[in-house]
Image: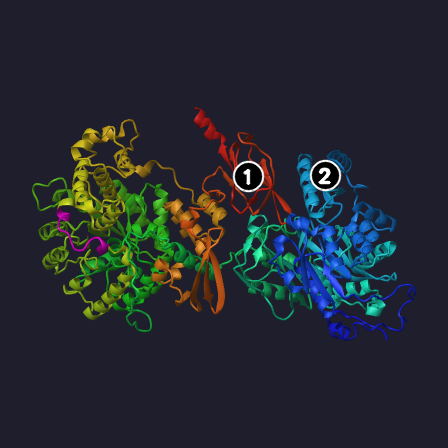
Amino acid sequence: MLLQVGGKRSALGLLAIRRVWSMTRSAHTAPQTLEYKPIKKVMVANRGEIAIRVFRACTELGIRTVAVYSEQDTGQMHRQKADEAYLIGKGLPPVAAYLHIPDIIKVAKENDVDAIHPGYGFLSERADFAQACVDAGVRFIGPTPDVVRKMGDKIEARSIAISAGVPVVPGTDAPISSLQEAQEFSNSYGFPIIFKAAYGGGGRGMRVVREYEELDENYQRAYSEALAAFGNGALFVEKFIEKPRHIEVQILGDKYGNVIHLYERDCSIQRRHQKVVEIAPATQLDPHLRDRLTADSVNLARQVGYENAGTVEFLVDKHGKHYFIEVNSRLQVEHTVTEEITDVDLVHSQLRVCEGRSLPELGLKQDKIRINGYAIQCRVTTEDPARGFQPDTGRLEVFRSGEGMGIRLDSASAFQGAVISPHYDSLLVKVIASGKDLPAASAKMSRALAEFRVRGVKTNIPFLQNVLSNNQFLNGTVDTQFIDENPDLFNLKPVQNRAQKLLHYLGHVMVNGPTTPIPVKAKPSPIDPVIPPVPLGEPPVGFRDVLLREGPDGFAKAVRAHQGLLLMDTTFRDAHQSLLATRVRTHDLKRIAPFVAHSFSNLFSVENWGGATFDVAMRFLCECPWKRLQELRALMPNVPFQMLLRGANAVGYTNYPDNAVFKFCEVAKENGMDIFRVFDSLNYLPNMLLGMEAAGAAGGVVEAAISYTGDVSDPMRQKYSLDYYLKLADELVKAGTHILCIKDMAGLLKPDSGRLLVGALRDRFPNVPIHVHTHDTAGAGVAAMLARVCVFVARDFSVWSVWETICPTMGHCVTCRCSISLEKVFDYSEYWEVTRGLYAPFDCTATMKSGNADVYENEIPGGQYTNLHFQAHSMGLGNKFKEVKKAYVEANKLLGDLIKVTPSSKIVGDLAQFMVQNALTRAEVEERADELSFPLSVVEFLQGHIGIPHGGFPEPFRSKVLKSLPRVEGRPGASLPPMDFQVLEKQLRDAHGDEITPEDVMSAAMYPKVFQEFKEFTRTFGPVDCLDTRLFLDGPKIAEEFEVELERGKTLHIKALALGDLNKAGQREVFFELNGQLRSVLVKDTVAMKEMHFHPKALKDVRGQIGAPMPGKVVEVKVKQGQQVEKGQPLCVLSAMKMETVVNSPLSGTVAKIYVTADSTLEGDDLILECYAVYIEMFVSL
């Protein structure tokens, strides 16, 4: 009977007759001295996926399995897949444990192991290990020790190849023992050259040197890597062939001299000389070249009496010439693709050959080996392509693989909860795809990779997806420079990872509390607001349709011609700025927006953007203000939007170059903004004119706002008289404003004053619409509004802000000739009343229980009043708020009686709290002005940073405070150089990737640090704007179930399960159920962390702090404290996953402090050293 093995398809038949020995050997003539010896127990002297691959083959053949593992691998899957598992290398470093031959042999002998499979890497090509197995009476599943020695010695392998007539690359005849020998070789053959480990492969100990200056460093690194990986640092040197294809031939031999090939594999796609993607067979390979490659491989194997599996590797240059480079006397990582196209199970064959079977007995004859289709293998690794493929380590929080027809997965520790160690290779899983041709196999591979979900560590999957979609790859014309010559492969599509990031956020809130500062200890209401019913279809036509049809001028005329009162709804911005510290989220605004569009289509506008909401959105709500504008625009297409523009300060608190203000208005208009209410906190005309010009140039409606203070009806207060306001209005109308606005931030415009001011403006500008914007801090806003409406109801109009106690309510306004349904107002009010409960921690009524008429004395703006109250409480002045309000009056007088709107109101408030905190009277402040340390906002105001106040700066107070400090003359932003948006965009793309939008550029231009922190937050915690407000602020309760809609049609079902105890790393594990699957996240307990010691992290925004680019161990520190270093100079060497990385200095300077030593174990971003830049040293010395 002839026993045949055809790989996987013959496995069951082979299992049934696994102990039957053929009585005839008609297929070949074998020496009668050889005896078939069945293997009963196999040990794999390796770890990870290759160990499991061998275990599976053994199980299919009825062979018992034994695993060995290091102390660091106690949780690895290969230990659990074996029938037995034993610890080796106790007390040794991680890699050394698997290189400890005595322990491995001891375990084999003590547990009756028949044969040892070496896998790949570690001891697989060590002749001394193969000999130790033989000496111990244990079979080595591989070539004989002598063949392993010959093939493992790259120099001797070259000699054998030469004697067999196989072409070789010029190189040294023996391993070199010194740098001098490498220098001599390079002098003879020139550059480039390549160092290779003499006793191992896989890219370890391999370094290309292109010029003399790189020789020393690369020799040292190659030697060190080879020593660490193979226990021997011997190297040999070859001439480096540019842009070759890397083709290898799979061979298989038996104990009877039979050798066959199983065709070739193309392994040209490499990174750091490590294969990334392998293809079988090689595409577009000349058939004659294939014949030469396979024939040379078989002849070489026969010459040395090769048995078992092996690989002969060649380089093929652009002229089609091939050069032998080495023989890998072991199973290769990429053996899988050969198995898929030939249907030969190589591990089965290895085991059977070791037992004494011949290849013909196994049905493995050369004329029977056929290629069937194509196969591709992708090595999915825990490496970050965006950071030079630096290994990443950590815990696999999520693992979901791609599967289906034509996909094979070989893996080990690829499961949820697995810990990826820095001690070993970064391979996570091998994905093998098969198809009738290369495009078919590529399509299956692309689909499978797209199905993968790996969270917790970075992977190279986005890079692999780019390779598979590359036309050069699909055409099969790649060489070893493919990755280097295709930088677009690194244009990586960001992995969204939204669900897991949100779980991290929820876990963080559950462990550490809210991420946004909470002023008072109050919980969000557990009651969710009910959205009033909204009709189907498009909303009715509104005033925005007039604006889009007739432009800003036509819009202004239509507004002026309107008979009756028009309203502006500030619920979406100014109202919640005053009532709820600007904390209302887009989530709650979006829910009610369709109702507003359908029910209040005849609104003059909705104020929903600009001012404090812009930076607060990023700073405290962790959401994009531009996205808010875009989403609200889509939901309310018929109502004009209005924003607050701080003149030359745009939406910031500082000065910007003029082109930044113009660009901001342009982008805002493009995103749906209609009306720009332009003001300046000092009514400083140059600042206002710039903002008006920018808004007009963008195509927006310009609404110039006169900030109101004082009392025009009081003849005793003439600094801000009626004449002052009329002259200012003259200039604004002359500058082309479409609408005039009275901005009464403190609610000081009493009924008599309102009649006087509005009447005078109406008389002077009969064709200009007038908008009165007020705050109802005193509670008299409704009366003032009614007085103005009653006087000008015939043709005049006013637009009023709304919402509860701070502003006059819509309910009052709609009674004054306003065509809005009261019933709709009631529904609208009910929604906001319940929604307001969600923001209980920020509600002004927590500290302010009613309106206050003392605003007529202190003139504190409504938006500031509540915030100032919160600030006073946070500074321990809550019980002195009455004194703060009185000090506000005195501070205002000290500063010259200012118009008080952000930011001027903040300046007065800062000075008032400073006076109360230090128990200073106005007289004492004036007297000691030259010695007191004033708040920065006060100093910058006196310098002229926000403009020139009406009446000038107070003297001698200003001179005493500033002393010799510089002063700004004229408009602050006029002297600033233009902002280069292209440079800024490039910087942002370098820092955050290519997903940067024009809106992001403007956010960074306005608030660089806030935008940076916002991007870092979203990178960590994902789209938290999808969460309900209570979840965002307070997190879920244990056992609570809820849904999160990521986007239309994608909803997460989440249940909070449990909160774990504190671990030794200062973390708590938080457990969830996500879409029916168990998930968990590790969250640092910030309170506990303060009591525990950890290695400091490098701060990204501190240039001189240099952190570890990856987790790993410090091999060598190359500098000393106080040493001068140049930019690019090596600082230290890190080793991770058997690869070494040199950390170079990003700047020239002096090493200030070193935080690591040799053998230090680091996590990513751990601080290595601090380096002071040279120019800083020079400055200090001066």
Amino acid found under the numbered disc labelled 2: Phe
Q: Is residue 1060 visible?
A: yes
Q: Find disc 2 in the rendering and name its residue.
A: 191
Q: Point out the residue furthest to the front here.
A: 110
Secondary structure of residue under mark 2: loop
Q: Quadrant of the N terminus?
A: bottom right
Q: Name the foreground residue: 87 vs 583.
A: 87
Q: Does residue 364 appear to the left or right of 1122 in the view shown?
A: right
Q: Find disc 1 in the rendering and name its residue.
A: 1156
Q: Is residue 282 visible?
A: no
Q: Name the foreground residue: 717 vs 237.
A: 237
Secondary structure of residue under mark 1: loop
Q: Which residues are magenta?
A: 844-856
* Cα–Cα span, label 1 and label 2: 36 Å
Q: Is residue 395 above or below residue 906?
A: below
Quadrant housing residue 467: bottom right
Amino acid found under the numbered disc labelled 1: Val
Q: Where in the figure is residue 86, as x and y percent of width and height?
A: 67, 58
Badge 1: few (under 14), some or many (20 or more) residues near its Cα, within 10 Å? some
Q: Name the foreground residue: 866 vs 190.
A: 866
Q: Where in the figure is residue 404, as x and y percent of width and height?
A: 61, 70
Badge 2: few (under 14), some or many (20 or more) residues near its Cα, within 10 Å? some
Q: Where in the figure is residue 311, as x and y percent of width and height?
A: 77, 56
1 or 2: mark nearer the eye: 1
Residue 27 part of the magenta segment: no
Q: Point out the residue furthest to the left here.
A: 715
Q: Does residue 614 appear to the left or right of 149 in the view shown?
A: left
Q: Point out the residue furthest to the top here.
A: 1182
| Mark before the other along the chain sequence, 1 or 2 | 2
